[in-house]
Structures are given as structure tokens and as C-alpha cells.
Image (cartoon, rainbow, N blue to C red):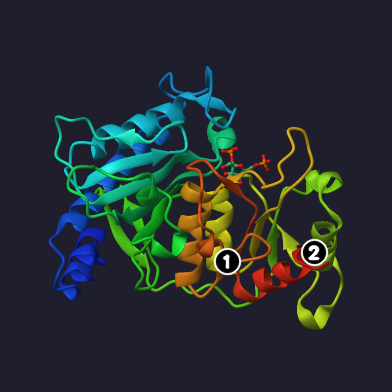
Amino acid sequence: MAIKRVSSTITEHLLNEQRLNPEATGAFTFLLNELIVAAKVINREVNRAGLVDILGATGDVNVQDEQVQKLDLFANRAIIERMQHIGQLCCMVSEEDANLIDIPVKYPKGDYILLFDPLDGSSNIDVNVSIGTIFSIHRRQNKEDNVDYLLSDVLQPGYKQVAAGYFVYGSSTIMVYTSGNGVNGFTLDPGVGEFLLSHENIRIPEYGSIYSVNEANEAYWNKETKALIAYFKSIDRKAGRPYTSRYVGSLVADFHRNLLKGGIYMYPSDLKEPKKPNGKLRLLVEANPLAMIAEQAGGYASDGFRSILNINPDAIHQRTPLFIGSKKDVELAEQFISRK
Ligand code: FDP
């Protein structure tokens, strides 16, 4: 009987990418491998969530004024503790921490900056809906020897990301990753304990048939946003409309579905109290990494006026409206939103 070769592991994939770059030292591969270990730890806890005392809120609110869930906190600590001692990072940014996370003096430092949302979709934790971890990696730009990093190293525009990805803890656990050479997906084989290549060279369809938005906010949208959603719902059979609506309320899960099937995810600005002139999502830890993946898969991400990847950030927890997914759908959204 012929034995089917097991798909390549994420480690093999990273080593292959490393070999293609003659200047690579292995530091980056090491960094990603450690992040994968942290994600496996989070995955284990997510899977045991109903069995151990880890469901529910901690009683605290985070920098975004949102309820902190126990699993949010666990995931945040799992990543910080795993990553701070590896010697490849000069600092980190987490959605859960108001300030930049310095590397303790007792550990060596490196040239990379890790930005992450430890557990996206917190409101879905207690109800077994998919949640995820999103990450982005930048390289330190300043060459000064006497500083670990400058704020400008952290506030780089998205097009300078050296890698980005996410883990979805869903019906299976998947890691989707890009370092600028296309997008690949790796599914965790729980028996082997490894992420195996399952979605090679992911390409998002040019047009989709899905729109994903929290439509309950419609009364608070501006007229341009209302007109855009009305367009996706209008009838034109030849053009494939009306689109279908899908929204679970975990950005990472909604994005992942649309990446594979084609479609557009939207979190526009709205005037619901507290007013969100810049939408709800964070530029550095949510929009930028997903925008890099979308573009690497042939899609596009916009704030309604310009490419997400071209925004020059001025604060680590800056928010941005987000329209992301199939290229033609997002370009259309831009036309509607920027209409005067
Ligand atoms: P959550 O607040 O549950 O963490 O990142 C924020 C986020 O989830 C996204 O994952 C999700 O798409 C969005 O907020 C949902 O917001 P609404 O409840 O306002 O639709």
C-alpha cells in the first residue's frame, strides 16, 4: 500500500522561505516558531474552556474600555511570556495593554517588533463561536546602538510589515500566514501536534457574493455607508446580487471565511454612543495584518478613502474604518464611501 506523504509542516515551510533569502540568519524563523508554540497553548486552553474556570469576564476593562475576558488575559500572558525571552524582539504591542511592552532587561533584544491581538472576537468566547489571534511583525528601522527602539519603529505603515498572520480557533485550528510571498494556510493536526499545509497559495476571488457587517448599526451610519450596503442587497441577477449576508462578530473568523469564499468585511465609522468616527477596529493589531494578507492573496483593504497599508499611524491603539476582502468589492466600497 502506498503511503501518502504527510503535507509539509509550517516549520518546513518557514525553513524553505529562510533558504530563499541568503541573508536570513534564522532569527525570524525562530521567532515565528515560538509564536506558534504560544498559539498552541492558547488553542489548548480554548478547547478546554468549558472544563476549567476560564470562561467569563475578569471584571476589568481594557484600554479600549471593553470587558476583559479571562481567556483574553490568558492569551495575552501566554504570548508575552513566551516571546519576551527569545532574544529576537525589541518590544511588543498588544491590544490588551495600554502601553508598549518592553523586553525585561535580563533578556537579550533583537530587531523585530511583534504587534498582536491575543484573542480577537472576545464576545464569542463563552458561546463556542470561532475566535482567533492576529499578529503583525515589523523590523526596527533605527540603527542607534543606545536605544532598544524608537516610537517610530512601532508606528510604521502597514506596507512595511515583514510578516503577518492569524490563528483561528474554530471547527479546526488554522494558521494563515504571509511574509510577502503569497498566503498559505496550515491546519493543526491535533494527533501530530503540528500545523500542516492545508491551503496552499490562497487567492481570494476578485468579486465575492458575501457581505459581512453589523447591520444593527445601520441607523448610525452615514448616507454613503447606507447606500453601499443597500447596493449589496439590491437585485441584479446577472451581477450576482443580492449578495448574501454572513457576520459572526469575530473579525478573524469573518475575514477567514471571506478570504476563502470571496466577499467583503466592513466595520465603517458610526455615530452610535460612544461615537466611532474611526470605526471600532485597531489599525496596528487588526487592520494592518489582515490587509497584508488580503493584498498578498489578491484582495484589497481600505478605510474607505485609501489603502489601509498606506496609513501612517500616530498612536498605537489608533482605530480605523475597515473595508476588506475581494478586490473589486472593496474598490466599489471606496467609490461609495468617498463620494461627495
Ligand atoms: P470583539 O469586540 O468581540 O473582540 O475586535 C473587535 C471585535 O470583536 C471584532 O472581532 C468583531 O468583528 C467586532 O469587534 C464586532 O463588533 P460588533 O459587536 O460591534 O459587531
Can you say whether 110 is above or below 104 in the image? below
Which residue type does callout 2 highlight? Answer: Leu
Q: Is residue 170 visible?
A: no
What's the mark number on residue 96? none
SS at mark 1 in the image: loop
Residue furthest top in the image = 59
Quarter occupied by residue 1: bottom left
Residue 316 pos. (x, y %): 47, 42
Residue 43 pos. (x, y %): 37, 40
Q: Earlier in the sequence, mark 2 or mark 1?
A: 2
Q: Marks 1 and 2: in contact by CB < 8 Å?
A: no
Q: Which residue is mark 1?
A: 307
Can you say whether 336 is above or below 250 in the image? below
Closer to the camera, 305 or 327?
305
Q: Which residue is mark 2?
A: 228
Residue 237 pos. (x, y %): 82, 79
Identify the residue shown where x is 45% and y is 71%: 296
